[in-house]
Amino acid sequence: MPTPDLEPEASIVIPAYNAEAHLVSAVKSALSQTLQRIEVIIIDDASEDGTLNIAQALASEDARVKVIANPVRLGPAGGRNAGLDQARGRWIALLDADDHYQPERLEAMISEAERRGCDFLADDLLLCDVKGGQETRAFDPDVMERQEPLSLLDLVTMDAFPKNFTRSIGFCKPIFRRDFIRDKGLKYDLRAFVGQDFVFYFKAIAADARFCLMPQAFYRFTVGHASHSTGLGALTRVAETHARLLEEEAWRKGAVLKALRQRQASIHFEIFRVHLRRHAPLEAIKTLTKVQASFFLVRFTASLRRRLGSALGFGSHGQTRAGARENGANRGLSPPQAGSAPTPAMNGAGGSEALRPDGRTRPQ
């Protein structure tokens, strides 16, 4: 085992809030990396359970583990910032307290990032459903195989949020160069309890980061833990975070601004739909004032057409369901079978999410 006095190749930052049920397995996956010159920084965000005691016990067993105990809860952004401030590794990697790394993750990613000259490098996510036991990839392989770095416009337009939480680029877990974020003064927005990762990645690219992708899935992302928060609360917080991003002068022009506005309109439209499902028409009407009229009409008429088609037994293009299945078969597609594993594209927004051990929400 390397001595802790040597500068580590990588710092693994693990924000943890009420994570006693999962923290040990997450840390063990970090310590089991084939890359041995690492440090693991656990940030206990004023947990109300035994998280801090478990973290301290892990640190007593392995000198590579360090513990930061926040005296008051700072939220996921505050926990991340505390870890970034203390990181000594040339590369920094995030790990949520209920997720896991594949053993070769850091060695493979650092090698690839240095070969390609990346400042940030994100792999695919392996979505692990703890209820059903299924495992699926989060992102489109064609997207993850691209070799050129992402632009700001790429980041916004390829993002599937809010229609599909797990296909949001904000859920990816890139490694990034410590010197880059410190030279650029990059920090997580302390006001953001949801959506802070997307904003951090956006500002990194705006600061000329070479933000790259790779198709392998080395990160095991857990979906389906039992405690819940409301989908409406998560969407509302994301809308607030996104609104602050829109207020900044640096990108208030051109195609990026247009894409950001459309993303914000999508978020408000999903909030509108949640209010309707909750039979809260007044709140739904208030939300409409925040949605661009043209965007709303396109989305609403498409949604209405699908609902009418479903009620009448027709597909979205006027064909019967049987005809849609036949056409899908002719194109080499098949409808999902009962009991089959849900793919990310089948998961909708506006439902419930699990409250994660790092204080974030994750979809159910």
Image: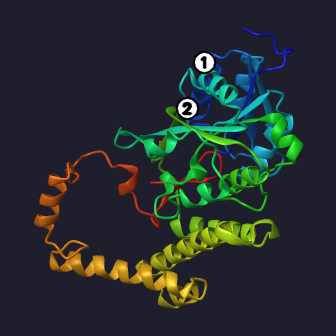
On screen, residue 235 above or below 208:
below
On screen, residue 207 above or below 182:
below
Left or right: 111 as drawn, with respect to 304 = right
- Read off the residue under disc 1: 32
**Amino acid identity at mark 2:** His
| Image quadrant where one finds the C terminus | bottom left
- Read off the residue under disc 2: 100
Left or right: 287 as drawn, with respect to 241 = left
| Residue at 52% over, 75% down | 271
Which residue occupies the extreme top position in the image?
Answer: 1
Helix, strand or loop at disc 1? Answer: loop
> Residue 309 shows which numbered tag?
none
Work out whether residue 6 or residue 56 is closer to the camera in this orientation and state it. Answer: 6
- Report crowding for label 2: few under 14, some 14 to 19, many 20 or more residues within 10 A (C-alpha): many
On screen, residue 259 above or below 298:
above
| Residue at 23% over, 52% down | 336
Contact, mark 1 vs mark 2 (Cβ under 8 Å): no
Q: Rounded to the nearest whole Å, what is the CA distance between mark 1 and mark 2?
A: 10 Å
**Amino acid identity at mark 1:** Ser
| Residue at 77% over, 62% down | 191
- Report crowding for label 1: few under 14, some 14 to 19, many 20 or more residues within 10 A (C-alpha): few
| Residue at 76% over, 20% down | 64
On screen, residue 251 above or below 183:
below
Residue 112 position within the rendered picture, expressed as x and y whole percent measured from the top left = 62, 26
Work out whether residue 190 or residue 27 is closer to the camera in this orientation and state it. Answer: 190
Helix, strand or loop at disc 2? Answer: strand
Residue 92 quadrant:
top right
Work out whether residue 364 or residue 120 is closer to the camera in this orientation and state it. Answer: 120
Residue 130 position within the rendered picture, expressed as x and y whole percent measured from the top left = 42, 40
Left or right: 226 as drawn, with respect to 147 = left
| Labels 1 and 2: the sequence-earlier one | 1
> How many dots with numbers?
2
